[in-house]
Image: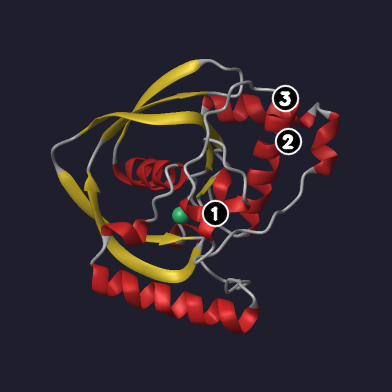
């Protein structure tokens, strides 16, 4: 949370903030969602601009997490804000996040994804994970995550590896979802908007 606040302060002082933009979120069956994203090599001005756009896009969706590949940028960058509606914003950035430990215990949570709009399914994952990552200053961190943070981090780290939450459900269900979205993509050319009154927590990212 602390590095998120620091980011906000710094961002407010930067001129590029004016160029922040809500970007289009890729939706299945877009093949770019299956790309394995590349590690970030330098934390520079373009990367900060990307992060700013990711927050704009994530908050507008609304979602609680977003991976850069979801706006078509195959870099290992994740934004997240797990604050509830009535709480102050808690923006968090994870650069080159990596799971270094998973608990043997598993838990099941309902997940949704901004790239698979309005589809929700129970997913079983390790209950806790330890994740190492860099912040926007290039400083290394390691966090032990439980509950929603654990689910969200695993969901987003999957994205940067080209994995979607529907890969963790039965093939029968996955095939049904893919079929539905392939059909919708043919009809609309791929774009699909979300209902405006969705609770952010429903779409993990
Ligand atoms: Zn997602």
Query: Comparing marks 3 and 2, which lies closer to the viewer?
Result: 2
Find out whether the residues at labels 3 and 2 contact each other: C-beta distance under 8 Å.
no
Q: Quadrant of residue 60?
A: bottom right
58 with respect to 199 (left or right): right
Secondary structure type for disc 2: helix
Image vertical order of residue 57 relative to residue 189, above or below: above
C-alpha span from label 1 to label 3: 31 Å
Q: Using the rendered image of the protein, determine whether residue 110 is visible from the camera's viewpoint.
A: no
Q: What label sits on residue 49 in the rendered view?
A: 2
Query: Comparing marks 1 and 3, which lies closer to the viewer?
Result: 1
C-alpha span from label 3 to label 2: 12 Å
C-alpha span from label 2 to label 1: 21 Å
Q: Using the rendered image of the protein, determine whether residue 40 is visible from the camera's viewpoint.
A: yes
The tally of labels here is: 3
* Residue at position x 62%, y 50% in the image: 72
Q: Residues within 10 Å of mark 3 (few under 14, many from 20)?
A: few
Q: Residues within 10 Å of mark 1 (few under 14, many from 20)?
A: some
Q: What label sits on residue 32 in the rendered view?
A: 1
Residue 1 on image: x %, y %:
51, 30
Which one is in front, 70 or 136? 70
Secondary structure type for disc 3: helix
46 with respect to 95 (left or right): right
Protein image colouring: secondary structure
Ranked by sequence position, the earlier of labels 1 and 3 is 3
Image vertical order of residue 34 relative to residue 89, above or below: below
* Residue at position x 54%, y 54% in the image: 32
Residue 161 on image: x %, y %:
42, 43
Q: Which residue is mark 3?
A: 10
Which one is in front, 32 or 68? 32
120 with respect to 205 (left or right): left
Residue 147 on image: x %, y %:
30, 44
Find out whether the residues at labels 1 and 3 contact each other: C-beta distance under 8 Å.
no
């Amino acid at each position: 949370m602390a590095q998120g606040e620091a980011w906000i302060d710094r961002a407010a002082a930067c001129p590029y903030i004016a160029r922040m933009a809500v970007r289009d979120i890729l939706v299945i069956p877009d093949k770019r969602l299956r790309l394995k994203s590349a590690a970030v090599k330098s934390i520079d001005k373009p990367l900060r601009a990307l992060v700013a756009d990711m927050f704009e896009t994530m908050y507008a969706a609304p979602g609680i997490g977003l991976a850069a590949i979801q706006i078509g940028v195959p870099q290992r960058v994740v934004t997240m804000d797990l604050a509830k509606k009535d709480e102050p914003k808690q923006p968090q950035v994870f650069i080159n996040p990596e799971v270094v430990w998973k608990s043997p215990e598993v838990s099941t949570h309902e997940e949704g994804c901004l790239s698979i709009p309005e589809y929700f399914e129970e997913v079983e994952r390790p209950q806790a994970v330890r994740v190492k990552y860099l912040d926007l200053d290039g400083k290394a961190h390691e966090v032990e995550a439980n509950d929603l943070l654990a689910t969200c981090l695993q969901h987003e780290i999957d994205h940067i590896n080209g994995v979607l939450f529907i890969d963790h459900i039965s093939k029968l269900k996955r095939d049904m979802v893919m079929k539905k979205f392939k059909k919708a993509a043919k009809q609309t050319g791929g774009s699909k908007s979300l209902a405006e009154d969705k609770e952010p927590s429903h779409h993990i990212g």
